[in-house]
Image (cartoon, rainbow, N blue to C red):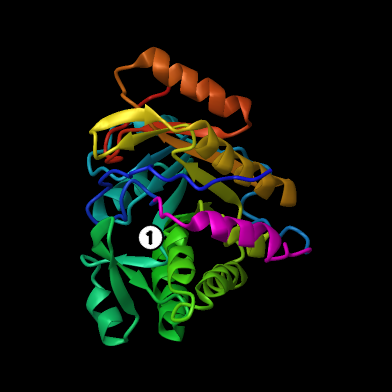
Amino acid sequence: MTWSRPKNIVPGAGQALSRRTLGTAFAGLAFLSAMGRNGVAARNEPSTTSAAFGDKKLDPFLVFYGTKFEPSLDRYALLILEHSDAAKLLLARQPKSTFLCYLSLAEVHSGRPYYADLVQDGIIGKANPNWPDANFVDVRSPAWHRRVLDRLVPEIIETGYQGIFIDTLDSAEHQEVHDPLRCQGMIAAAANLISSIRTRFPSLLIMINRGYGTIPRLVGQFDMLLGESVRTTFDSSRKAYRRVSAPDLQWQRGHMIEARRRNEKLQLFSLDYWDPSDIPGLSKIYAEERADGFIPYIATPDLTTIVPEP
């Protein structure tokens, strides 16, 4: 099957230091997706699913970058949080839940405390045109690998998280596709960094957001895959929620199912965006995602409001 890349999905604002809602639609990744299927051989190695994961099904799950925590958070088996003081309080009082910390791998927000160090190291690239407060990162840099492996991930673990949620892999792919001479090797470097995280921290849970041109290189190296805006999204240009097109749905759905075909232990999650007051609409989206075997959550674009499943 041939999948086309979503062309018009426009992500929302996201939390102040998070990337945005989570992913970005970059034109031209249809070529990259084809390369991921045909030009990059899947690694024929046994699954190395984290020992902490086992067969646990983390349902229901929540992506939440808010700072005010409510009792309703107690019902979620898996929570993806922004690394903040407020999140630390939640971790301290909910030991039964599984927590993943947001980690942007191919972009860095200018508000991060280590941003200036990366500029000095020559790692920071152009601003993301869809998110000007975030700059692309040269994921090939040994200095970036050292910071992730020696500082960022250990800090996350010390705070009490059981895993990481890796975002912005699409940005590594975007750079290599649109500037193949200057950015050659970005995709491989991103995959190598994730593999290094798995090797260094074998019990750490790893969820990846999209990154479909990268994940064929990572079979068995991560535990969970999240598809963002699988069926519905928020169009920021029109300030309205909408269904994605049928080709866009098939493109992403196909990549997710193919990833699970390569690793039958891989758990698939979906993150959609919809009007929280439309209860029948929410119920329909949840039913459709669950019919595909995905663990779903439907949110508002800023990911700071808890939207319960009907």
Looking at the figure, which quarter contains the N terminus? top right
Q: Is residue 222 above or below residue 249?
A: below
Looking at the figure, which quarter contains the C terminus? top left
- At a point 60% along the width and 45% down the height, the residue shown is 3
For residue 59, say whether it is visible: no
Q: Residues within 10 Å of mark 1 (few under 14, many from 20)?
A: some
For residue 14, say whether it is visible: yes
Range drawn in magenta:
25-44
Residue 147 rendering spot, x and y as whole percentages: 40, 78
Residue 59 rendering spot, x and y as whole percentages: 54, 33
Query: What residue sits right under mark 1 in the picture?
Result: 159
Residue 125 rendering spot, x and y as whole percentages: 32, 75
Q: Compare residues 246 and 197 and report the one nearer the observer.
A: 246
Question: Can residue 63 be found in the magenta stretch?
Answer: no
**Side (left or right) of 31 relative to 218:** left
Residue 226 rendering spot, x and y as whole percentages: 51, 45
Quadrant hosting residue 41: bottom right
- Is label 1 in a helix, a strand or a loop? helix
Q: Compare residues 170 and 163 and report the one nearer the observer.
A: 170
Q: What kind of residue is marked 1?
A: Thr
**Side (left or right) of 48 relative to 119:** right
Q: Compare residues 132 and 194 and report the one nearer the observer.
A: 132
Q: Is residue 244 above or below residue 186?
A: above
- At a point 50% along the width and 56% down the height, the residue shown is 29
